[in-house]
Image (spheres, helix red, strand yellow):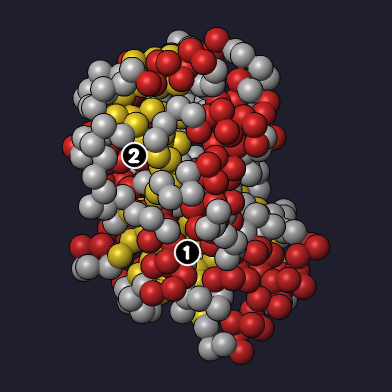
Amino acid sequence: MNLLQNQKLNNKKALIRVDLNVPLNEKKEVTDYTRIEAIKETVNFVIANGGSCILLSHLGRPKGKDENLSLKNILGPVSKTLDKPVVFFQDCIGEEAEQATEKLQPGEIILMENLRFYKEETDGDNMFAEKLSRLGDLYINDAFGTCHREHASTAVIAKYFPNDKYVGKLLQKELEAISQIAEYGEKPVLAILGGAKVSSKLNILYNLIEKVDKIIIGGGMAYTFIAALGGKIGESLIEEDLIENAKEILEIANSLNKEIILPDDIKASTDFDQNDLMKTFDSNKIESGWIGLDIGPRTIEKFNQVILSSKTIFWNGPVGVFEKEAFLEGTKSICNSLKKAKMLGVNVIVGGGDSIAALKKLGKEDWVSYISTGGGALLESLEGKTLPGVKALLDEN
């Protein structure tokens, strides 16, 4: 796999697949600049080494051309964030697009129109990928968030650059972070998995139980495991069809001398929206009519001790209904413990939209070792899969 280092790009036009699928409000204003900021390092590298940049991205899920999802709507924010002038072109293929990129001079940046205005992009169409490839001299994939898609601009286009396809700086960081979790992170390695459902992280659990030393399971998914151990969980969320899977994962952990850590106590309510009526139960003795919605004080202390005794930590998913103040305490405690661990030199990696949202809500995102920009791509990587967009950079032809 070719990395972007020591590459001389004098007068080369770099075709860069980036992920500018940013959230917009009703006024078409960008509400989160994270993905734009994430492309700066690769763009700056290309320009510093004598090249020009042709940015390819999608925005939303348009059905054909849709002015509301045109990348011209984010031209200003992209230019401002990169601190460089960026030109917009109203298409991403065709003779005029090729002429526009041909005129690029070293140091210049052009943003092409939304790839998904063409159905051929999501179809992974070879002819569309070949047309895209005519725009540049070399190809760089820096869009980790789309690497799990078999789309033309990620999984197909690379074959048209057999000797000139590269891993972007962001993609390189993402792959290194995943390797630290699953392969060579300093031990003990801890994974903290939360969120609502076991089903969304079942394959990750099967894969990570063989890779990491300990797994904390919190949030709604914990109750399926507690039930699998014979506990009473009241009206808490449970996936009955995954009880046997939960038992199997616990058995695998035991056979491998790995530790799965579940809540000891939980904070519950009789109604999801009735936050003034709360009670704390042992996690395996929740009374009928009560719903577990956050971890309790004993669990907070227990999780804190596990976190502070680890050397590499990956966190994905809140441990309670953090959107409601009444059930934010558990997730807040995870953030605080992770910050303490980071100050002690622990490598802290965070991924997943809800985890990142919790960090931002609490104003704690600045200290994390690495925050992944990928959603589905991250989860599929942690399942042990080689992503199509990454495989395309590895293939010889």
Element type where label 1 sits in the image: strand
Query: In the picture provided, is 17 more to the left or to the right than 270?
Result: left
Element type where label 2 sits in the image: helix
For the N terminus, which image quadrant? bottom left
Where does label 1 land, which residue? 192
Q: Is residue 117 above or below residue 328?
A: above
Tell me the amino acid under the disc marked 1: Ile
Q: Give the residue drawn at x 41%, y 31%.
A: 136
Q: Residues within 10 Å of mark 1 (few under 14, many from 20)?
A: many
Tell me the amino acid under the disc marked 2: Ala
Q: Is residue 70 visible?
A: no
Query: In the picture provided, is 13 more to the left or to the right than 183?
Result: left
Q: Earlier in the sequence, mark 1 or mark 2?
A: 2
Q: CA distance from mark 1 to mark 2?
A: 24 Å
Q: Is residue 89 above or below residue 212?
A: above
Q: Give the residue drawn at x 33%, y 76%.
A: 186
Q: Is residue 253 above or below residue 198?
A: below
In the image, 325 versus 111, the foreground residue is 111
Q: Is residue 125 visible?
A: yes
Q: Position of residue 397 (x, y in %)?
A: 55, 53
Q: Give the residue drawn at x 23%, y 36%.
A: 10
Where does label 2 land, which residue? 38
Circle nearer the viewer, 1 or 2:
2
In the image, 207 versus 46, the foreground residue is 46
In the image, 1 versus 316, the foreground residue is 1
